Amino acid sequence: MSRLHAMSPLLLAGALALASPARAECPSRPTWPTEDWPDGKAEVAAARPAQIKALEDYAFTLTGKDEERKGIRTDGVLLIHKGRVVYERYGRGFDVSKRHLSWSVSKSFTSALTGIAVKRGAVALDDSICKHVKAKRQESCAITVRNLLEFASGLDWREDYENGGSYQDSSVLAMLYGEGRKDMVSFITGHELQEKPGTSWRYSSGDATLLSGVLDAALKPSEGRDWPFTLLLDVLGMKSATWERDGKGVVVGSSYLHATPRDLAKFGFFYLNDGCWAGQRVLPEGWVAQSTQVSEPIKQKSYEREHEDVQGWQWWLNRPIPGVQAERPWPNVPEDAFAARGHWGQSISIIPSKDLIVVRTGDDRDGSFELDSLLKLSLAVVEDLP
C-alpha cells in the first residue's frame, strides 16, 4: 500500500483495486431498497419459530428495573437476508419509524464519505490535514488522511467514557460536551503528538471527528454544508437520518448520526454490495475490500486495545491480527464479517458470505451484551433459507 502515497487521486481507484480483491463491476440485485425493504418476515416466522424464539430470548429479555440499566437492553433488531427483511422487532418504546442515536456507528459513515471524497479527487490519502484545515499546533500537520482513517494520528488522546478513567481527563467527553464542542477541529489539533503519525493504533473519536472536519473543508465549497446527505445519505434513501454538528457547523463524524434501523441497514447493504447503489458505483473500486483489511498500525503498536479491537478503516473486523492475535473476535461467525459499532450496543453487522445484515440498537450499560452471541443466533434464523 505504500505506493499509494505517490499517486494522484485520479489513479487511486485503480491502485485500490490492485491492492486487494474487489469486484470489477457492481453486483446485480433484483431490487434496491432506496424507498423501502421487501418484506419476508411472515414466511420466515413460519419456517423458523424455534430459532426466532432463541434470538428473542437472548436479545429481548430485560432484567431488573429499567432505571437500573442492567443486563441486555435491546431497542431494536433487524435482519436483512438476501435483500429483504426476514426479522424485525423493537422494544423499550421504539418502533420502525423512530430514529436511534448510532454513536460510533457514525465513524464507519465518515470512513465511507472519505472514500467518496477520494473518488471525487477532493482529498487524497496522503494529504496532510493542514492542506484542508488550520491546526492549532503546527506539529499536527504531520497527520494525514490515511492516519485518521487508521486511528493512527499519534495524538495524545483519552477515549474515556462514563465507566472508566476521569471525566476531567477524558478528551472525548471534553470534545462532545465541554470546551471542544464549539470548534472540534481546533480542540483536537490542540492535543500534543505522543507518537509519530502512522506508527501506532489508538481508538479515537478525535481522529474520526478531525477526519469529518477535513472532509467538510474539502467538500463544502462545491457541495454545500449538507454534503454528507447529498453525497451519501440521500443516495441511499436514508430519509430518517440526521447528523448533529459542532459550533462551527461541521458534522460530528465520530458520534452523532441518528437514523432508524431500516435506514442503517441500507448503509450495510451499500457495503455488502461493494460500495455500489442501484447499479452505480459510489465508492472507489477496491475501497470496501481495503477498508475491511486489518490496518497496518494496529499490527505495530496499540494503546488500550482489547480482544475485540480489530480494525480496518474505522470498521470492526472478525479477523486475526498477524503476529498479534490469532483468535477472531467473534468465533461463532464467519471470518468475512465486519461491523460498524457504537456505544451502548449499537451495531450494523455485515456477513457477505451469508448475504446477511444484522442491525441492533440498544442501551446496554454493564457489558453483558455480546455481539458474537447475537450474530450466532441470527445466522441460525437464516440458515439454508432460499
Image: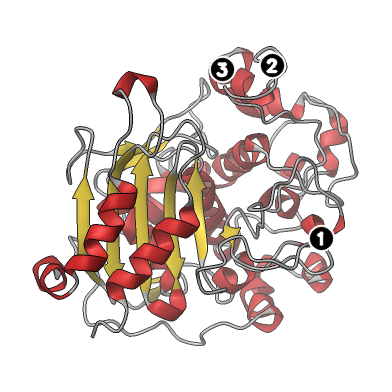
The Cα atoms of the two marked residues, 3 and 2, are separated by 22 Å
Q: Can residue 277 be seen in the rendering of this structure?
A: no
User: How far across and down, in percent of the image, does residue 8 sit?
Assistant: 72, 68
Label 3 vs label 2, nearer the camera: 2
> Badge 3, how many Cα within 10 Å: few under 14, some, many 20+?
some
Up-down: is 105 above or below 298?
above
First in sequence: mark 1 or mark 2?
2
Q: Nearer the viewer, residue 86 or 191?
A: 86
User: How far across and down, in percent of the image, does residue 129 sit?
Assistant: 73, 43
**In the image, which disc is placed on residue 166?**
2
> Badge 2, how many Cα within 10 Å: few under 14, some, many 20+?
few
Residue receiving disc 1: 299
Residue occupying the point 75% across, 50% down: 147
> Badge 1, how many Cα within 10 Å: few under 14, some, many 20+?
some
Residue occupying the point 70% across, 47% down: 306
SS class, disc 3 = helix
* Residue 88, image quadrant: bottom left
Residue occupying the point 41% across, 82% down: 26
User: How far across and down, in percent of the image, does residue 376 sit?
Assistant: 42, 65
Up-down: is 38 above or below 135?
below
Give the amino acid type for the residue marked by disc 2 in the picture: Ser
The Cα atoms of the two marked residues, 1 and 2, are separated by 28 Å
Q: Nearer the viewer, residue 115 or 222?
A: 115
Give the amino acid type for the residue marked by disc 1 in the picture: Lys
Q: Which quadrant would the N terminus be assigned to in this image?
A: bottom right
Q: Which quadrant would the C terminus be assigned to in this image?
A: bottom left
**In the image, which disc is placed on residue 182?**
3
- Relative to 104, 138 lies left or right: right
The Cα atoms of the two marked residues, 1 and 3, are separated by 35 Å
Give the amino acid type for the residue marked by disc 3 in the picture: Lys
- Relative to 292, 277 lies left or right: left
